[in-house]
Image (cartoon, grey):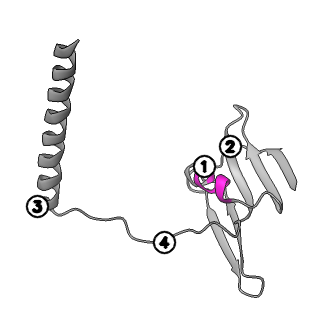
Amino acid sequence: MSLKKIKFETPSRVEQETILNYDNSSQEWHIYSDTIKHCKRLKPLLDTSRPLTLGYNQNNSLTMVEGYLSNTSHIIFGKKPVLTPERIQKATKALKAYQTELKRNKQESEKRK
C-alpha cells in the first residue's frame, strides 16, 4: 500500500470536480475528487493496495481523494427519482400512519412499566 496524505484546501465550488477515468485495457477505474461529498462516498471504495492520495484541510477533514476503485466496488449512474404529487401524498400518508403506530407502541410500553 502506498498511502500519501497531503494538505489540501478545498477549492471554491466553481473549481471543484470529480473525475472518473476507465482504462479498458486494464479494466480499472481511476478516481480523483476534490468535492467533499464525493470524497466521503468514494474513500471506502478505493483499493488500498494501489497508490492512494488523501488530502486533508487544516481542520483535518477529508477534502481530496485520488486512487483506484477496488475490484469489489462499483458505482451506479442514474437520475434521481422524481415523485409525482400522488406519490408524495401516498408517502406522506404512510409516514403519518407509521408515526402514529410508533407513538401508540411507546404509550403501551410505558403503561406496562
**Left or right, 17 with reference to 66:** left
In front: label 3 or label 2: 3
Per the rendered image, the range of residues in magenta is 39-45
* Circles 3, 1 touching at the beta carbon (< 8 Å): no
Sequence-earlier tag: 1 or 4: 1
Callout 4 amino acid: Phe
Q: Secondary structure at mark 1?
A: helix
Sequence-earlier tag: 2 or 4: 2
Q: Which residue is mark 1?
A: 40
Sequence-earlier tag: 3 or 4: 4
Q: Which residue is mark 3?
A: 86
Callout 3 amino acid: Glu
Q: CA distance from mark 2 to mark 1?
A: 7 Å
Q: CA distance from mark 3 to mark 4?
A: 26 Å
* Circles 2, 4 touching at the beta carbon (< 8 Å): no
Query: Dot 2: few (<14), some (14–19), or many (≥20) neighbours within 10 Å?
Result: many
Work out which quarter of the rendered image holds the C terminus and state it: top left
**Residue under the image location 63 percent in, 57 percent down:** 42
The quarter holding residue 32 reads: bottom right
Instruction: Indicate whether 50 appears above or below 26.
Output: above
Q: Which residue is mark 4?
A: 77
- Closer to the camera, 27 or 104? 104
Callout 2 amino acid: Leu
- Residue 18 lies, in percent from the top left, at 62, 63
Callout 1 amino acid: Lys
- Closer to the camera, 66 or 8? 66
**Residue under the image location 21 percent in, 24 percent down:** 106
Q: Which residue is mark 2?
A: 62
Instruction: Indicate whether 56 appears above or below 102.
Output: below
